[in-house]
Image (tube, helix red, strand yellow):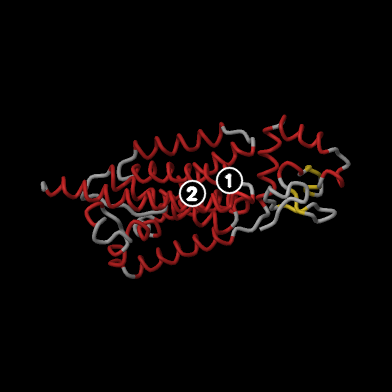
Amino acid sequence: MSVCYRHPSNEAYVRCQRCERFICPQCQVEAPVGFLCPEDAGQTVAAVAAGVRNSAAYTARRTGRRIKGAAAPITWALIAINAAIWGIQLLVPDFTYYLVFSPVVAQLEPWRMITAGFAHDPQNPLHILLNMYSLYILGSALEPMLGRVRFAALYLISLFAGSIGFLALATMNNYELGASGAIFGLMGAYFVILRALGGQLGQVASIIAINLVFGFLMPGVAWEAHVGGLIGGVIIALIYAQTRAVAKRGLQIGLVLGFVTILVVATYLVADLRITSYLGL
C-alpha cells in the first residue's frame, strides 16, 4: 500500500510523472504528460484544492484517464475463470447442473450461491459476452482505485448478495446463473465511489436505472439477483469510502467482515423461512 507524500493518511495509486512520488487525488494536477504533484506543476496546494473542489467534471475526467492505462489483474482473472467454466459447460452439458442456484437447495448446497455466479447459459453466447464486457469496463475502472484485495472482496460479496436477493424474492423452484448480481454490485460501487471523488453521477445513475428496468421487463432475467447485488455493492463501497484513511484500515476490515457475517446469517434465516413455508410445515 502506498500513501501520498503530502497526506500520509490518504492512499495513493498515482505517481508524479517527474519526481515519481505518490500523490493522492487532492494533490494530482493534470498535465499533458500525465499527472504532476503541486510542486512540479508550479501550483500552490490551495490552487490545486480549489480546482478539485470546483470541477466535478475534471475529477471524473481525471479518474477515467488514470484508470485507462491501469492494470486490473483480478478483473482479467475473473473473466478467464468465467470463460473457462463456460467452455466446460459447452463440452459437458451436465456440468451446468452442479453450478446453478435455486432457493430450494439453499440449505443443503449453499455453495451454489457462489458457483452460480461463474456459470452462464451455454445456449446463449450473448449472456456471457455482455456480462464479461461489463466486468471488463467496470473492473478496469474500480480495481486500480480499490486495489486487488478490496476489488475481489467487492465482487464476491456482491455476487453473494445477489444470490441472497434471489433466495428472498424468486419463486422457490426457479434457478439462476450468471455474473449479473456481481456486475450490478460493481455498478452500485462505482456510483458511490465516483460520488466520493466528486465526479458527475447522472450518466452512471442512468445506466443503473436502465439495466434495472430492463431486468424487470425481460422474461427469464433474474432481476432479484440484480437488486441484491446492487445493494451489496453499494454497502461495501460505502464502507470503503468512509474508511479510506490508513488509520481506519482495521475498522474497514472489521466492517466488511461484519457485513459478510450478516449476509451469512441472513442466508440461513431466509432459507429456513422460505423452505418451511414452501413445504407447509
Q: Quadrant of residue 210?
A: top left
Q: Residue furthest left?
A: 280
Determine the residue positioned at 33% across, 48% down: 164
Residue count near mark 2 (Cα–Cα under 10 Å), binned few <14, some 14–19, many ≥20: some
Percent position (x, y) of residue 94?
A: 28, 67
Distance between the alpha carbons at the discs numbered 1 and 2: 10 Å
Determine the residue positioned at 46% across, 64% down: 81
Determine the residue positioned at 41% across, 66% down: 87
Mark toward the start of the polypeptide (1 vs 2): 1
At label 2, which amino acid type do we have?
Leu
Compared across the picture, whether 225 is left or right of 26 comes to left
Residue count near mark 1 (Cα–Cα under 10 Å), binned few <14, some 14–19, many ≥20: some
Q: Nearer the viewer, residue 161 or 95?
A: 161
Percent position (x, y) of residue 5?
A: 77, 51
Q: Residue furthest right?
A: 42
At label 1, which amino acid type do we have?
Thr
Percent position (x, y) of residue 202?
A: 56, 31
Q: Residue furthest top?
A: 54
Tag shown at residue 255: 2
As helix, strand or loop, the secondary structure at mark 1 comes to: loop
Quarter holding the N terminus is: bottom right
Residue under circle 1? 243
Tags 1 and 2 in contact by the CB under 8 Å rule? yes
As helix, strand or loop, the secondary structure at mark 2 comes to: helix
Q: How many marks?
A: 2
Q: Nearer the viewer, residue 46 or 245?
A: 245
Tag shown at residue 1: none
Above or below residue 78? Residue 214 is above
Determine the residue positioned at 79% across, 37% down: 48
Above or below residue 107? Residue 239 is above
Q: Nearer the viewer, residue 124 or 30?
A: 30
